[in-house]
Structure formats: C-alpha cells, structure tokens
Image: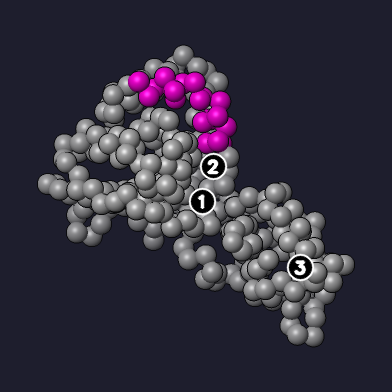
Amino acid sequence: MRITGYGSGFGQHDAGRDRAAAFRAKHSIGQRIKGRILRREPNGLYWVQVGGEELLARLEVQADPGDELIFIVRALTPEIMLQALAGGMSAGDLPGLVQRFRAAREVFEVNGSEMFAALQAVPPDPSLRLEAFLKALEARPDSAANYAKVLALLTQVNSSLGDKQTAVALYQPWLLPLRRRQEMLRRDRADGDTETSSSAVDPAAGAFEFRLRSGSDAASLVLTAERPEACGPLQVEIAALVRGELGLEPVMLGPSRLRRNNLGGVLGELFGDVPSWSSGGLNTRV
C-alpha cells in the first residue's frame, strides 16, 4: 500500500524518502520488529510505530490502538513490505531462521576469505574441492566453529519446512569457492528428475542463479546473472562441476539477465508469494 505520511512529516515527499532510507539502513530481510498500533484514521488506515518510525499503513489484521504486534521484514526494495505474524506464531519462524542462517554464513565467508581463495586453485571437481575444503577446516578451528553454526541453523531451516515442502536447503561453499552468499535448494520431481536451484554473488557477473535439472541420462542448466556478459568463466566452472558430479554434459541455456527479487537468494522461494500473506500485514510503498 502507499504511505501517505510519516509522523510529524505531514506527508512531505522528501521527508518520506529520508525516513525510508533510514529504515532500510537499519533493517534487513527476515528481521523481526516489534510494532505498536497508535491510532486509526477515519479512512481505515492506521498509524503504526515500527522500528522507531511512525508509518501510516493499511493493516490487514484485527488490531486496536495500543496493541503490540510482531512484524517480519519481507522486502526492502523497491517497496518496504512488512508482515504481521499471526497470533501464536513461533519466534523461530522460517524467514527468521533463514535470516539467522544468512548472518552466520556472512561471518563464515568473510572470516574464511583466505581459505576460499586457496580453494580456487583446486580443479572444478566436486569431490576434490570437498576434500580440500574439509582439510582447510581442520587447520582453522575458528572457521570450523563458524561453519558448524551455519550448518546448525540450516538444519533448523529444514526442520521448519514441514511435510508439505518438497525442497531441501543446502549449503556447499566448496563448489564455487570465490563466490559469496551461496545457498541452494534441491527438489525431487514427480517425474523422477532432480531440480537444483542455487544463488550466489560473483565478483564479475554480480548476483546470479543457476537451475539444474538432471535425470538418469540428461541434464539441463539455466544460468541468469546481473551481468550476463561477464559470465564466461562462471559458466565454464559450473559446467565442469556438473560433469564431475553427474558424469553428464549439461545443455546450457543462457546466460541471460537475472530478474532480481526482494527476498535475497533462492531460499526466499521457501517463503512463497510475498504479497499473499495469509496472516495479513502491512505493505509500505515509499
């Protein structure tokens, strides 16, 4: 929905833009924020105090002035989107767990940057890179501890998916050691094929995703990137990894331009369709 004013800013465009920038600077996707209902306007909109800011928003849950709600930050660009948690929803909800996984992953990847740089010298064979990765962890207790935290959170993410989810979240940073923010989803299809989606950030190509569909005798791979014209080395490396893992030559589609979403990497697919929130919420357009 559209925000028509902020606190004492009286709806001034520049004030709204500054407040939106301040909100984005202080918050991240998946973060939980406590909000309080201030008052209801005659037109049905509510003034809500969230994250230190007063937002005029359409609230899609039943609430009265003075009520406190917990919101999840669903998106920050191009719109700020917040979802109100339904009553009784666990604080360890899936978006919150994914956000904690991503934060732990960032610590691990930043602190282990020298280790990953050394792994790049290993040929693009999954088993060779995994072996080198495990040996590197043995020599770096701090990195091993950080990696264990990442895996523990990933286990919680998978445990929260429930029986209806057909995907398994994975983290295999040894596959593409120079790429950051790696995350992966693997699904078994009804036709017997396996579908693997992965996202990360490449120094040259920017944010990218690849989607691999593999069967017993064929594999196809779709590659999209923020800068597809810079995908040459990445494309060669991914194809080599597929050959090493599956023994198949993948049919490569792309690279084409990546359509960015507001949920980060492919784990955001677990959240479903962002605007369709069964628990209601508020959508702030600034």
Residue type at mark 3 is His
Q: Residue furthest right?
A: 8
Q: Could you say which quadrant of the image residue 239 lies in?
A: top left
Residue type at mark 1 is Gly
Crowd class of label 3 (few under 14; some 14 to 19; many from 20; radius 10 Å): some
Q: Which of the two labelled residues, at mark 2 and mark 1, occupies the earlier sequence position?
A: 2
Residue named by callout 1:
264
Q: Which residues are magenta?
A: 104-121
What residue appears at the point 39 percent right and 61 percent down from the top-left corner?
164
**Residue 58's spot in the image, x, y percent?**
69, 75
Report how far apart the C-alphas of labels 2 and 1 lie in the structure.
Answer: 10 Å
Report how far apart the C-alphas of labels 1 and 3 lie in the structure.
Answer: 28 Å
What residue appears at the point 59 percent right and 69 percent down from the top-left corner?
279
Q: Which of the two labelled residues, at mark 3 and mark 2, occupies the earlier sequence position?
A: 3
In contact (CB < 8 Å): disc 3 and disc 2: no
Residue named by callout 3:
13
In contact (CB < 8 Å): disc 2 and disc 1: yes
